[in-house]
Amino acid sequence: MERIIFYVLALMMIVFAINAVTSRKMLRSVIYLLFVLSGVAGIFFLIDYNFLAAIQLTVYAGGIIVLIIFSVLLVHHIELKLEMAKPVRQIITAVACLIGIGVFLTTIYSHQFNVVNNHYSTTTSDIGFKLLSYDKGGFILPFEVISVVLLAMMIGAIVIAKGKKLE
Amino acid sequence: MIEGISIYEILTLTTILFFIGVYGFLTRRNLISILISVEMILNASIVNFVIINKYLYPDMLQGVLFSIFIIAIAAAETALAVSIIINLYRQISSVEVKDTEVMKF
């Protein structure tokens, strides 16, 4: 059963990802991206990381997609067709990407992974304790730094998007 | 872990997603489309972190925590990029890459 769900999710993600990078209508490619992100959340649910799947759905599908849609609507005319690269360049890029996929896959398949059979389930409180622990391997410092980064990002975004004063 | 699915199949899926993102990054001519491709690349890397955490070191949490940090950084990056794009559009009325010659604020 999980096998079938995984294959359906994988097929959906690949098809929508290809559509998202080749569609010539801006808004449609954003919506295709939304399906790819939801597929990633589905994979997180399948491997039993519920908290991560919830973060993926709220931050990506809820936040980033809405942000990109807003910027598309502010910046584009809705029926504008996008300009694409020259066909020669597209083919060269596609061939380069296929070579890259080949190299990556031969590397992955020739490596022997020590897979541990397990059915651990991680609770949200485990993640919280690890995130706030001072011990060896704890993540308190990055956690505090990232809050400063988010604050700086907010101030920077407001200052940049406000622009110059009209005089 | 997922019943009946080996780590190789999931890594294949993320590799394909990553290179679709690279393809879009190189062929698109529009700043917002490039942003979409970057999101796709970041998502492929997040899935890799989580999958390797779950399949190889199931009693640790490092992969999950790193992917949480990557998601936070990605959100910050998107918000800043959108504000830069809106500011550029105000100044030169275009978001095409070829028109973007000056990024002086």
Image (spheres, helix red, strand yellow):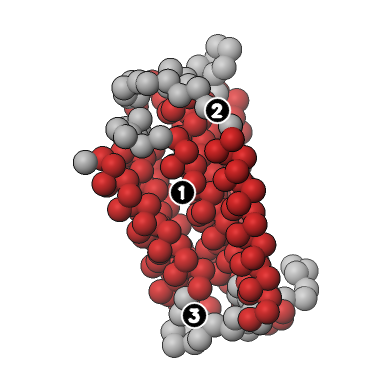
User: Which of the 4 image quarters holds residue A17?
Assistant: bottom left
- Per the image, label 2 sits on a secondary structure element best described as loop
Q: Mark 2 points at which residue?
A: A112
| Residue located 45% across and 35% down the image | B7
Quadrant including the N terminus of chain B: top left
Q: Please provide percent x and percent y for residue A41.
A: 36, 46
Depth check, mark 1 against mark 3: the one in front is 1
Q: Vertical placement of B38 versus B15: above or below?
A: below
Disc 1 from disc 3: Cα separation: 25 Å
Q: Which of A29 and A109 is in front in this view?
A: A109
- Out of A4 and B22, give the one closest to the viewer: A4
Say the numbered circle drawn on residue B4: none
Dot in front, 2 or 1: 2
* Residue B104 can be seen in this image: yes
Query: Residue A105's quadrant in the figure?
Result: top right
Write the residue at 58% across / 32% down.
A111
Give the amino acid type for the residue marked by disc 3 in the picture.
Arg
Badge 3 element: loop
Q: Name the residue under label 1.
A: B13
Camera-side residue of B39 and B82: B39
- Chain identity of mark 1: B
Q: How far apart are marks 2 and 1 (CA)?
A: 18 Å
